[in-house]
Image (cartoon, rainbow, N blue to C red):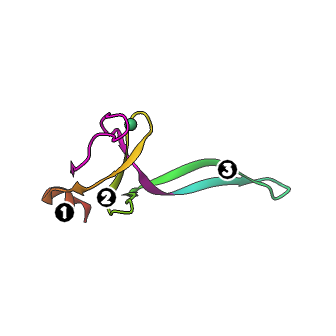
Amino acid sequence: MKLAKPKCPECGEEARSTVEQLLGCADIEIDGDGDAIYTDTEVAWEHSESVRGPGGGIMLVCPEGHSWESEVKFTEEELSAAE
Ligand SMILES: [Zn+2]
């Protein structure tokens, strides 16, 4: 993919991550009193999806934790692999 704004507008560092929305299954254990506690979470990585900003671009994060939106272009190969 090609990012229109690969560098952080606040500190100038290159993006380290994209913000992703994930689906998961959080395991719980229920004790005799009916209280449930979380034990582990299984993430369904195949459902990972980049979070889109108000302008339709993907959200990026720099090593300092700043986030910003960037337009993104995917190659034909990346688009067909995602289908
Ligand atoms: Zn930054």
Q: Quadrant of the C terminus?
A: bottom left
Q: Amino acid at mark 2?
A: Gly
Mark 2 lies on residue: 57
User: Amino acid type of disc 1?
Assistant: Ser
Task: Identify which residue is drawn at 33% across, 55% down.
Answer: 58
For disc 3, the marked residue is 38
At label 3, which amino acid type do we have? Answer: Tyr
Q: Residues within 10 Å of mark 1 (few under 14, many from 20)?
A: few
Q: Disc 1 designates what residue?
A: 80
Q: Secondary structure at mark 2?
A: loop
From the viewer's side, name the closer residue of 60 and 12: 12
Q: Nearer the viewer, residue 69 or 10?
A: 10
- Left or right of 9? Residue 40 is right
Q: Is mark 3 within 8 Å of ligand 1?
A: no
Estimate the spatial distance between the alpha carbons at disc 2 and disc 3, rounded to whole Å. 34 Å
Q: Is residue 2 left or right of residue 55?
A: left
Q: Which residues are magenta?
A: 1-23
**Where, by quadrant of the figure, is residue 11 drawn?**
top left
Q: Are marks 1 and 2 in contact (CB under 8 Å)?
A: no
- The numbered mark, 1 or 3, whose residue comes first in the sequence reads 3
In magenta segment, residue 11: yes
